[in-house]
Each structure stands twice: as C-alpha cells, then as structure tokens.
Image (spheres, rainbow, N blue to C red):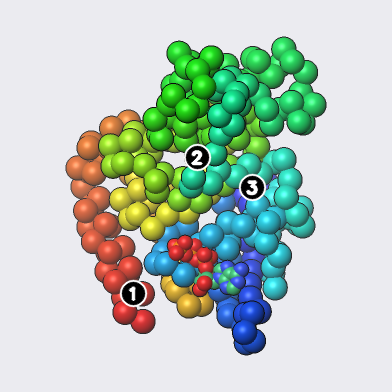
C-alpha cells in the first residue's frame, strides 16, 4: 500500500485577470507527500507556492489536475486539513486554553476531551505555563505557537502552513523550526510548509519541492537527508557534511529563477 497521504497530480491554475487576459500561476505540478513527513514548497516570489497550498486546503479551485488525500479527491475545505497563516491570529478576549479549545467546541468535541486535548497540544508547543494567560500578553512567537496548537488540537491529518514564521525575529524563528520537528515527531502529523527561506527549508524538510516562477512548475525535488538521527539543534544540523553545499546549490537555483 502506498505511504503517500497526499498526491498532487498534474495540477494547474490559471487566473483570469481583472483587466482581461490570463495568468498561469501553476503549470502541471505533480508531487506526493508521504504520511508523517514534512514537505516544504520552496521557490522565488510568484512561483505559485501559496496557490498550491490553497488548492490543497480546498480554498482555491483547480483549473486542471487533481489533489488526492488518502486517494480521495479534495473538492473543498475539510477538517482533515488544518491551515496556519503567517499572521498569528488569536482571540484576545480568550485565554490561551480557550483559544485552543475554540475550534474543537465548534466541531462538537465534548468539554472534557476539549480540555485534555488543549492541554496536550499547548504542552507540545511549550506553553503549559501560559494556559490561562491572554494572548495579548504573549510575544509574537508564543502567539504563533497558540495558533499552531489550536490547529493541531483539531487533529488534522495534514497541517498546512504558509510562511508561518515570516513575521518572527531570527532567534524565535529557528526555535519555532526546532519545535515543528518535535511536533511532527510527537504528533505524527503530515505537514506542508511554504517558505522562501532556504535554510528553513533544508532544516525542516523531508522533501523540498522547488518551484520555478512564472509559471510555477516543479524544477526539482530535493531530499535533504539531514533529518535522520533527528539532531535537535539547528547549529548542529547546519554543521553536517553536505549541508552548505546543498544550501549553495539551492541559492544558485533561486538566483537563476530570479533572473528569468
Ligand atoms: N487571485 C489571484 N488573481 C490573479 N493572480 C493571482 C491571484 N493569486 C495569485 N496570483 C498570481 O499567481 C502567481 C503565483 O502567486 P502565489 O502567491 O501562489 O506565489 P508565491 O510563490 O506564494 O509567492 P510569494 O512567495 O511572493 O508569496 C503570482 O504571479 C500572483 O500574482
């Protein structure tokens, strides 16, 4: 049986422009995402990363092709796919615990289970001490962790993240990256992460899908192979043999795309 949870098959997206004409944002893109893995969509601005993620989320229609989750076509949003956006969005009038419980409440999860799951996922993102705190009292990174815990608490099969750490300072950013590796391992959640940060991509990904721009096409699939052994600290990972060569290679690819 295939281990691929998600199959993106020959997907294209053509936007009709308001002033007439069309723009092919995504052109015949195919890739698969293995269950429990982290797939990173990397590429220059305008390579269709967000559009692909939104099609997987069911928030954007496809012009052609298919997206299959467990071999079932995706035709709209669904609970088995949870999305975390760049701007950390939380309800400031509710405690961290209530924020995380909110989605489950909407989904009809009983109160006891809600509380238990909220505690588990708040613990997983390292915020147990802040369960009764209001988000306005937390830093940007902590609020983004609340958003991640809230999405994970709905127990999606796939977590979709669009530039999730883009608004964070450098130190918080790499702490969040380390956290995501722990979360992926502890929860078994499959993840697709959009970024244009090369280092972030290499650090997080089991598979990088590198996209070219205008139109967005798969230029190369890269398997970084730095995760087996699961080194926790980023400074140890970037010192591994082959890491800087891969970073250089991808920087060149990025530059080529930028000059097109
Ligand atoms: N609703 C829309 N209508 C028209 N064009 C769009 C729409 N959404 C995206 N596009 C265009 O499609 C292309 C791909 O956009 P997309 O946001 O998916 O790229 P991206 O790789 O995520 O870029 P970035 O890294 O800058 O976020 C771009 O040229 C963009 O202008």
Q: What percent of the width, then of the height, locates residue 116?
A: 64, 14
Name the quadrant of the C terminus.
Answer: bottom left
Q: Give me the residue at 65% from left, 37% from top.
A: 156
Q: Which mark is residue 2?
A: none
Q: Which mark is residue 5?
A: 3
Q: What percent of the width, then of the height, locates residue 115?
A: 65, 15
Q: What percent of the width, then of the height, locates residue 128?
A: 48, 15
- The residue nearer to you, when weighing 19 against 57, is 19
Q: Describe the element under mark 2 as helix, strand or loop.
A: loop
How far apart are the alpha carbons under marks 3 and 2?
27 Å
Residue on which disc 1 sits: 258
Whichever of labels 1 and 2 marks the residue nearer the N terminus, that label is: 2
How far apart are the alpha carbons under marks 3 and 1?
32 Å
- The residue nearer to you, when weighing 134 against 178, is 134
Confirm or reject: label 1 Cβ below 8 Å from ligand 1.
no
- The residue nearer to you, when weighing 23 against 140, is 140
Q: Quadrant of residue 117?
A: top right
Q: Which numbered disc, 3 or 1, marks the residue closer to the eye?
A: 1
Badges 3 and 2: C-beta atoms under 8 Å apart? no
Q: What percent of the width, then of the height, locates residue 170?
A: 28, 42
Q: Give me the residue at 25% from left, 50% from top.
A: 243
Residue on which disc 2 sits: 88
């Amino acid at each position: 049986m295939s281990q691929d949870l998600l199959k993106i098959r020959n997907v294209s997206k053509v936007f009709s422009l308001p002033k007439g004409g069309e723009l092919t944002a995504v052109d015949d893109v195919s890739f698969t995402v293995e269950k429990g893995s982290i797939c990173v969509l990397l590429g220059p601005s305008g390579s269709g990363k967000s559009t692909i993620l939104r099609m997987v989320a069911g928030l954007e229609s496809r012009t052609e092709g298919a997206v299959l989750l467990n071999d079932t076509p995706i035709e709209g949003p669904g609970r088995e796919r949870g999305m975390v956006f760049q701007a950390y969005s939380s309800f400031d009038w509710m405690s961290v615990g209530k924020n995380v419980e909110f989605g489950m409440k909407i989904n009809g999860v009983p109160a006891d289970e809600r509380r238990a799951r909220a505690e588990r996922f708040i613990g997983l993102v390292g915020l147990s001490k802040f369960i009764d705190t209001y988000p306005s009292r937390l830093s940007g990174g902590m609020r983004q962790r609340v958003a991640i815990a809230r999405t994970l608490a709905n127990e999606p099969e796939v977590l979709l993240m669009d530039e999730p750490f883009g608004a964070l300072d450098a130190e918080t950013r790499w702490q969040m990256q380390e956290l995501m590796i722990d979360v992926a391992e502890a929860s078994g959640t499959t993840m697709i992460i959009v970024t244009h940060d090369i280092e972030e991509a290499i650090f997080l990904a089991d598979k990088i899908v590198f996209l070219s721009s205008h139109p967005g096409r798969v230029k190369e699939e890269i398997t970084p192979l730095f995760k087996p052994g699961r080194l926790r600290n980023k400074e140890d990972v970037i010192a591994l043999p082959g890491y800087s060569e891969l970073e250089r290679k991808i920087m060149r690819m990025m530059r080529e795309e930028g000059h097109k």
